Image (tube, grey):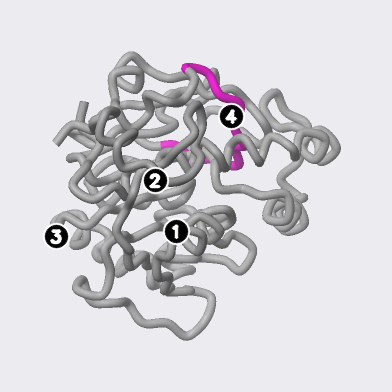
Amino acid sequence: MAFSLQKWNKDAKTDVIGTKTTIAMKQLRIHYFQHVSFEGLGFIETWANQNGHRLSSTKFFEAFNFPTLNDFDWLIVMGSPMSVDDEDQYAWLKSEKEFIHKSIEAHKTVIGICLGSQLIASALGSNVYPNKKKEIGWFPLIKTAEGKATNLLNDLPDEITSFHWHGDTFDLPIGAIHLFKTEICANQAFSYKDHVLGFQFHFEVTPPSLRLMIDNGRHELTADDFIQTEKEILQQADQCYLSNEYLSTILTKLAAEGNRFTR
């Protein structure tokens, strides 16, 4: 079902970008996969708590269990410095990709961020490989023509400065809709079958989580065309708040009962 802006305004309750209101939404059971201690939910946790959603997690750096498919409505797969093919070092990656695929087949809402988007692409049969340049810092996202035609994004500008920290990229899964690109990385975001989203970038980053990423990844901040210095990154930390607003808009639309993000 295509998203109805008229329905959004009718069911509105609190503020979102460009309006005085937001969509009424049902309570969701959100399960998330966290790969390293320093890349948690960020602003997603704030959004979930503010809207009364239930959070649970699988943390692969601790003793863990996978949930059953009946345990959750949404699955959010977070980022990490590792690669999707590092199964020799992280044996659970194979099982994680299988679980992501099962979740997609069960028509769960599945959202991937950075490594999470790469894991989704891999689970859908696409290649994941090193990008021609690492992209670390605040760089412009540009909506594709398909992104401009996607109702889920129609309240966002056509160009957005967002935070990036990735060295790998992926081929778009067959049947996916290409949503965003940057100068150095063509496939920055995609949707798939109206209930799957992959974002290479970090709309969820907050000033504290930004600092954690830097503290744990400072060795990657080497001189290169698309790698900003620590100082340059932190000088733009206020950009987090606008990124969080954009993410809130997307998640709130997606959470509206009976609505998906078809064009």
Question: What residue is drawn where x is 58% and y is 56%?
Answer: 42
- Residue 3 location, x and y as percent? 23, 33
Residue 252's tag is 2
Range shown magenta: 158-169
- Residue 107 location, x and y as percent? 16, 55
Camera-side residue of 249 and 203: 249
Does residue 54 appear to the left or right of 43 in the view shown?
left
Distance Cα–Cα, label 2 vs label 4: 33 Å
Residue density around tag 3, few if under 14, some if 14–19, many if 20 or more, within 10 Å: few
Does residue 171 appear to the left or right of 193 in the view shown?
right
The amino acid type found where label 4 is placed reads Lys
Q: Which residue is mark 3?
A: 106
Camera-side residue of 53 and 171: 53
- Work out whether 13 lies above or below 190: below
Distance Cα–Cα, label 3 vs label 1: 25 Å
Residue at the limit of the structure toward the bottom, as seen here: 63
Distance Cα–Cα, label 2 vs label 3: 22 Å
Camera-near label (3 vs 1) is 1
Camera-side residue of 50 and 195: 50
Question: What residue is drawn where x is 40% and y is 55%?
Answer: 85
Q: Do we see residue 166 in this rendering? A: no
- Residue 77 location, x and y as percent? 41, 57
Q: Which residue is mark 1?
A: 51
Residue density around tag 4, few if under 14, some if 14–19, many if 20 or more, within 10 Å: some
- Work out whether 245 lies above or below 186: below
Residue 133's tag is 4
